[in-house]
Image: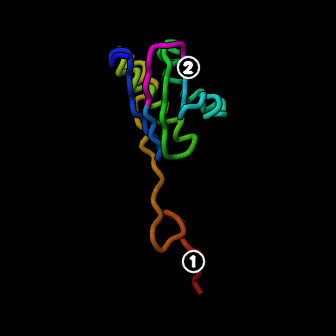
Amino acid sequence: MEAADQFAGTGRRKRAVARVKMTLGQGVITVNRKAIEVYFPRQTLQQIVRQPLEVTQTMSRFDITIKTIGGGISGQAGAVRHGIARALVDMDEALREPLRKNGLLTRDPREKESKKYGRKRARKRFQFSKR
């Protein structure tokens, strides 16, 4: 396999990181060596993953292999979506505009705020007692 018919992209969301490799094929999506229906059992997560392919009408053109680590299942789905969008841009620069319009190339910057010392969580205080 040549480098010309393989396209890559890295996606991130929350604490999750997804490495995406796309090759020409029948539209099979594999996440951590499992079918997408097995790895992401919820229909909404599968829709999130397929969103960049639907926007660019490339649903059954590519076989996609994904390795994802960190975070939870929702963060991983968002990271996979980001990675697929980046891989599509790597393949064809003309797809940048529709992906950008749908907000698929923007990395979601929201992260969990770290816990502060002397508190229960990041912002929660202990109950105040005047007397």
Q: What stretch is highlighted in magenta?
A: 20-27
Residue 104 position (above or below residue 128): above
Q: Is residue 128 visible?
A: yes
Q: Distance between the residues labelled 2 and 1?
A: 57 Å
Q: Residue at x 57, y 77 (%)?
A: 128
Q: Is mark 1 on a helix, strand or loop?
A: loop
Amino acid type shown at disc 1: Phe
Q: Which residue is drawn at 56% across and 74% down?
A: 126
Query: Within the magenta stretch, is there residue 21?
Result: yes
Amino acid type shown at disc 2: Val
Instruction: Identify residue for label 2.
Output: 28
Q: Give the image's coloring scheme.
A: rainbow
Image marks 2 and 1: residues in contact by CB distance under 8 Å: no
Q: Residue at the far bottom: name it.
A: 131
Instruction: Name the one closer to the observer, 63 or 82.
Output: 63
Q: Main secondary structure of the magenta part?
A: strand
Binning the other alpha carbons within 10 Å of mark 2 as few (below 14), some (14 to 19) or many (20 upward) gives some
Indicate the quadrant containing the C terminus: top left, top right, bottom left or bottom right: bottom right
Q: Is mark 2 on a helix, strand or loop?
A: loop
Q: Residue at the far front: name it.
A: 1
Indicate the quadrant containing the N terminus: top left, top right, bottom left or bottom right: top left
Q: Which residue is drawn at 39% across and 29% down?
A: 9
Q: Comparing marks 2 and 1, which lies closer to the viewer?
A: 2
Instruction: Identify residue for label 1.
Output: 128
**Rendering coords of residue 31 (x, y %):** 54, 31
Instruction: Name the one closer to the observer, 62 or 48.
Output: 62
Q: Residue at x 59, y 75 (%)?
A: 127
Which is more N-terminal, label 1 or label 2? 2
Instruction: Name the one closer to the observer, 29 or 103.
Output: 29
**Rendering coords of residue 6 (x, y %):** 38, 19
